[in-house]
Amino acid sequence: MKYLNSKEVASAMGVNVSTIKRWTDSGKLDCYQTVGGHRKFLLSHLKGFLKQKINQNLRVNIIQYLNKGEKELVQRIDRIDYKYLRNHLFQLGLQQSVDSIHDVINSLLIKGEPHYRIYDELILNVLNRVGDLWSNNKLSIADEHTMTETIRNVMYRIHSEISKNNVKIPKKVVCMTLTNDEHEIPLVMIQSILDEINIPSTNLGPNVPVPAIESKIQAVNPTHLIISSNYVLDADKFNSEISRLIQFCHKKDIEILIGGSGNHLLIEENRSTTIELKNMADLFNYFNVEMDS
C-alpha cells in the first residue's frame, strides 16, 4: 500500500505543506499519523477529499503527479479517452506494471469516474481482449497468465483503498462463482462497487460448491446472492446448481442476481426467477434503486 507524506501531497495538490496541515487539523483531509506525529496519506484519503471540492486544478495536479513525465497519458485521462487507455493498459499488463495501472485507475477515479464505468469500459474490456487473443492463438498462455495476474493484483489494491462509512444499511450480499469457474477478478469488482455504496458483502471466492454456499447463507443471512458466471463447463450442471439455489433462497426471501456469459445458458425457469446483470453498471444501478426503495 503506497503512502504519501505531507510534502508529496502538497506538491501533488499544488499547495503549501501548511495548507495540508490545516486541512488535516480541521478534519477536512483524512490521514494516518505516526507515533512521531508525521502525517501519512493514502490515495483513498485524497479521493475522499477531492469528492468534496469543486476545484479542477487540484484534480489535474494529482493526475499529473500520479503519471509523472507522461504528458499524453495525462491528456488522455483528462479527456477520459477509454479507447486510448485500453491499449495503454494492455501494454502495461504485458509489462506487469501493477503500479502504473493502479495510478491510471486512481487518476480516473479522481476525475470523478465511478468504479463501475472504469470496470466496464476499461478493465473488463482488456480482459475480454486477452481472452479472445488467447483463444485464437494470438497470445501465449504465459502472457495470458501474466496479464490476468497483474490485473487481479491491481483490483485487490483498488478494493483495499475504498473508504467505507459506518452507515447501517438493511442490505447484505454474498457473491461467488459456481463449480469449475475460477474467474476471481469480477468478484473483486462486484465487492468494490458494493463497498463504494456502503452495502455489506461477503466474497466466497471462485469455484464454490452449492452446499458450501447454502452453509454460508445460513450463517450470514443475506438479502441478495450474486453469482458471477464467466466460465460454464457443463450447462446442465450449471442449471441444476442454479435451480437448487433458487429453491433454497426462495424460502429465505433472498434475491439472486447472475452476471456474466452464463446467463445465456439458463433454462427459461431459472431465467425468469433470477435477475440478469449484463455489466457492472447494471449492478450499480440495481442497488442504487434498492437503496432508495
Image: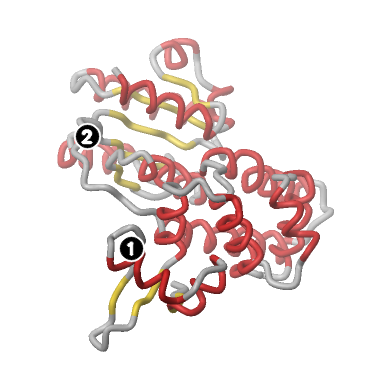
Rounded to the nearest angstrom, the CA distance separating label 2 from label 1 is: 24 Å
Category of crowding for the residue at label 2, using alpha-carbon neighbours closer than 10 angstroms: few (below 14), some (14–19), many (at least 20):
few
Q: How many callouts does the rendering have? A: 2
Q: Is residue 234 above or below residue 49?
A: above
Q: Is residue 253 left or right of residue 73?
A: left
Instruction: Report the residue marked by disc 2.
Output: 169
Q: Is residue 207 above or below residue 155?
A: above
| Image location of residue 279, percent across then percent down | 56, 31
Category of crowding for the residue at label 1, using alpha-carbon neighbours closer than 10 angstroms: few (below 14), some (14–19), many (at least 20):
some
Could you say which quadrant of the image residue 103 lies in?
A: bottom right
| Image location of residue 289, percent across then percent down | 38, 21
| Image location of residue 153, percent across then percent down | 52, 63
Q: Is residue 217 above or below residue 97?
A: above
Tell whether label 1 touches label 2 (CB within 8 Å). Answer: no
Q: Nearer the viewer, mark 2 or mark 1?
A: 1
Residue at the image point whose x is 46% and y is 49% from the top? 53
Residue at the image point whose x is 36% and y is 45% from the top? 195
User: Which numbered disc, 2 or 1, marks the residue that appears first in the sequence?
Assistant: 1
Disc 2 is placed on an element classified as loop
Q: Is residue 205 left or right of residue 150?
A: left
Asked whether 186 or 219 is in front, the reply is 186
Instruction: Report the residue marked by disc 1.
Output: 30
Q: Is residue 251 left or right of residue 51?
A: left
Residue at the image point whose x is 30% and y is 38% from the top? 199
Which quadrant does the C terminus fall into?
top left
